[in-house]
Image (spheres, rainbow, N blue to C red):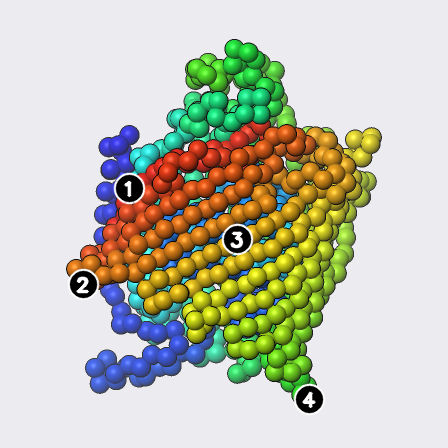
Amino acid sequence: MKNIKELKLAHLAMCVAGALVLPVHANVSEQVQDVDSEASGKLERVEVIGSRQAYQGNFSPLETPQSELNIDSEALQNAGAVDLTQALDLSASVARQNNFGGLWNSFAVRGFVGDENLPSNYLVNGFNAGRGFGGTRDLSGIESVEVLKGPRAALFGRGEPGGTINLVTKRANFNEKAEVSLSVGSFNTARADLDINTAISDDVAIRLVGFYEDAESFRDTVETTKQGLSPSILWNISDESQLTYELEYSHQEIPFDRGVIAIDKELGVIPESRFLGEPGYGPIETDVLGHQIEFQQDINDNWSALVGFNYRDTSLEGLASENGFSAPDEDGNFGRFSRYRDYNAIYQVFRAELSGNFETGALSHKLIVGIDADKFENDQFALRDRSTDQSINIFAPVYGQYPESSLDLASNIDRIETQKSAGLYIQDQISLTEKLDIRIGARFDDYQQKLVNRGSESVSEYAKSKISPQLGVVYKASDALSFYVAYGENFRPLSGATDENDLAPNQSESAEIGVKFALNDGALSGTIAIFDVKQSNIATFDADFNATAIGEAASKGVELDLTGELTDTFSLRISYSYVDAETKNDYTDAISYNFIPAGSDLLNVAKNQLSLQMVQQAEFAGRELDLIAGLVYVGERSGGFGDPSFKLPEYTTVRIASSYEITNSLTLRAEVNNLFDEEHYTNSYSDTWVQPGTPRSFRISATYSF
């Protein structure tokens, strides 16, 4: 195994070395580049286009009447984050959720999670992209992660009530860069990253970002392989026009792992490393192929137009043995079942937007108006075997007792659901005075759902229209302090809705008040927010066990985000949240079939959560040395739907790292995660589906820049 990994890394290093012999062009700035005409023989060229994101407009943090947290590339690098889950640990407003055996990202913002049968949705440069089956999101091609809290349906459309996650990608630009990073770590983990950005003319730049990772795990027999590429092209058609194209490709092989089980509600009876599946069934394979293209036109100094299209094709396929829901017998024999899945999804999104500034009398306006449309095809086929005894002894597991050939797989799921939506949105932020702004916005959505059950040869359809309003007020007390209040509504169509069951969309209302501040001459900024979210029309069952939407839940709490520099050499990030999230009425959960009494805590949502990161810059032998420390605290939380007695214990993990600049081109980094080797459990779905956290681990990496 080790020799194979060394050969793979050597092969990748040779490919990287070959790529780096490409000609490197002179540095060109995105904004203004002066070229010495005598030395280069070229005319001076001025570039004025700057990349913009749809739905966001041009607002400073202090004039935005909602809480937002930007996790930039430096913060991600300091945290050693290589996937989206690790990045979101830097926001205390985000809680880990059931991740489908490690096959996708699932999270709750301010206590609320989306459809448990699908990954949590996230945006990529403003495009819906998270829904689908492409595996966990790697951060190789990601520049920053934005946690946009509160409802955003007035602009983004259907979404989750707690907030939205937006990923900003590493796009081609005119700043020359060539960088390769190699790392090795605990559990025979080996990884390589590549990032090459270059201008091939005065008007065209290209960028190639890629990664390869091969790793074992602290989980017995669990091994993963991941690889991906994210090339992009930027074409400055003119001083006012810009075209950007990005491709996303990834392939992952990940064993399906439902985690460990609790014995009589007690965790730790079996070790965190104990894998209860069948290694011989092999990994689940996931694939992504996506295309994103955007055209931006600056009309004049005040107005800009943006048109974009996104197409993302994802798939998940493989056989797995899964933990059952019954407790093991007195000898430790634990029941399992097997399931084969072949899931495919296609997501298409189109948008066109106009944004700009204008005045009416003494009032100044910042306007965003646009249209968009999306189509999501969710094709699921699954076979399941529950007819034979597939038990395993949790104290002395013996693998390979139930070969694939002995399974009696019967039809489980065979359907395709298509959701279409078209929307029109408008937002106007009006400056009534130099200090007082109001924000008014609304969105109209018309959506349709069609469910084709191939097993029963039935077709069901559903259609609905929805208006989502928003209102915000910002008072800028000074250049360093502002106060805001905000109200918004949100909705999310429920999967499986038909004209017969009339599953009305999941609806939410959210209100928050907050204060934003900038200290230390703007070097340190933060937000304190108080929020109250009410959610209704949660999918459930009525007394006759018919599908309905009568579930209600609520979340309220306080958040603090503080980030920036205390001194020229010491930076700090603090994120804290207190979230009280619970059900508001009795109902039967539509996924677990458990009875949920009113007042039950929402799954995996801790009342108290804290993320802390500190960086001290120093010098050693005349070179930069960064000393990094981080901490994540997660309080006690509910561990099972409809089972208030089962709790996941609180935990605190500490990480330390050091980064040292050996030369102008070479940087070494060493890090230790979970420094005190704390036994912890990050999320669960029931007492037989509990995900243990990684014990103490090490990683060493080298980054070479050209």
Residue depicted at x 49% and y 35%: 681
Q: CA distance from mark 1 to mark 3?
A: 32 Å
Q: Quadrant of residue 625?
A: bottom left
Answer with mark 4 or mark 1, whichever residue precedes in sequence: 1
Residue depicted at x 63% and y 25%: 411
> Is 297 on the left-hand or right-hand side of 176?
right
Secondary structure beneath label 2: loop
Disc marking residue 576: 3
Relative vertical location of residue 513 with respect to residue 328 in this rendering, above or below:
below
Q: Quadrant of residue 308?
A: bottom right
x and y, in percent, of residue 599 in the image:
72, 40
Q: Amino acid at mark 3?
A: Tyr
Residue 458 seen from this side: no
Circles 4 and 2: CB atoms closer than 8 Å: no
Circles 3 and 4: CB atoms closer than 8 Å: no
Q: Quadrant of the C terminus?
A: bottom left
Q: Amino acid at mark 2?
A: Gly
Disc marking residue 184: 1
Count of labels in the image: 4
Answer with mark 2 or mark 1, whichever residue precedes in sequence: 1
The residue singled out by tag 2 in the image is 622
The residue singled out by tag 4 in the image is 361
Mark 1 Cα shell of 10 Å, populated few (<14), some (14-19), many (≥20): some
Q: Amino acid at mark 4?
A: Gly
